[in-house]
Image (cartoon, helix red, strand yellow):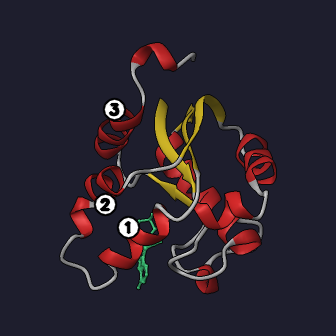
């Protein structure tokens, strides 16, 4: 099934000029980047985006990290895109990420793990709608 998922190239990666290298891994995995924008997330945007984690001890650090430098927000499209992108990203903690995954290749630690990807089709639609309108997405 063709799906869309939401991706963020995080501050640790944009600061190290890794946007192109990460996009090459995404495209190499058969996922098409059908919308993309570089933004500096506001505190309000980051808090809303990560609201599900607001009771976690790392929430404050997560919001601070995500607003520390620009990010690249993206919509990816492809066969089973949600699960496929999670495979391509690798485990949240780069120490546990498989060889060849984005996090194994580029992530620094669990908080600076280079990319975010939606965890379900339902959340993908919610996350995409926070940052893109349909007119921004050219499939
Ligand atoms: P992400 O996929 O963006 O979703 C939530 C983020 O919280 C996750 O990636 C990690 O970057 C971050 N995170 C998860 N666990 C921890 C932790 N123990 N300490 C700091 N950040 C974490």
| Residue drawn at point x = 33 percent, y = 49 percent | 45
Residue 1 showing in the rendered view: no
Q: Which of marks 1 and 2 is nearer the N terminus?
A: 2
Residue at 49% over, 51% down: 83
Q: Nearer the viewer, mark 3 or mark 1?
A: 1
Instruction: Identify the residue position indicated by label 2 in the image.
Output: 50
Q: Residue 129 carries which label?
A: 3
Disc 3 + disc 2, Cβ < 8 Å: no
Residue 72 in the figure: left or right of residue 25: left
Q: Give the residue number, with chain letter if any, for mark 1.
A: 63
Crowdedness near tag 3: few (<14), some (14–19) or many (≥20) residues, C-alpha within 10 Å: few
Q: In this view, does 48 lie above or below 57?
A: above
Q: Distance between the residues labelled 3 and 2?
A: 14 Å
Residue 75, given in percent of the width and then of the height, sits at 53, 35
x 27%, y 85%: residue: 57
The disc at residue 110 is none
Is the residue 49 above or below the residue 101 in the image? above
Query: Is 110 displayed left or right of 105 in the figure?
Result: left
Tell me whether the residue at label 1 lies in contact with that at label 2, contact meaning CB atoms closer than 8 angstroms.
Answer: yes
Q: Where is residue 89 in the image (x, y as percent from the top left)?
A: 61, 61
């Amino acid at each position: 099934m063709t799906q869309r998922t939401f991706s963020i190239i995080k501050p640790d990666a944009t600061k190290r000029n890794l946007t192109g290298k990460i996009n090459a891994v995404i495209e190499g995995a058969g996922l098409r980047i059908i919308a993309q924008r570089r933004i500096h997330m506001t505190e309000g945007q980051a808090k809303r985006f990560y609201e599900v984690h607001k009771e976690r001890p790392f929430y404050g650090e997560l919001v601070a990290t995500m607003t520390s430098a620009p990010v690249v927000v993206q919509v990816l499209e492809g066969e089973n895109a949600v699960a496929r992108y999670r495979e391509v990203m690798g485990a949240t903690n780069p120490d546990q990420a498989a060889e060849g995954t984005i996090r194994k290749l580029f992530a620094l630690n669990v908080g600076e793990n280079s990319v975010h990807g939606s965890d379900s089709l339902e959340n993908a639609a919610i996350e995409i709608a926070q940052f893109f309108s349909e007119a921004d997405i050219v499939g």
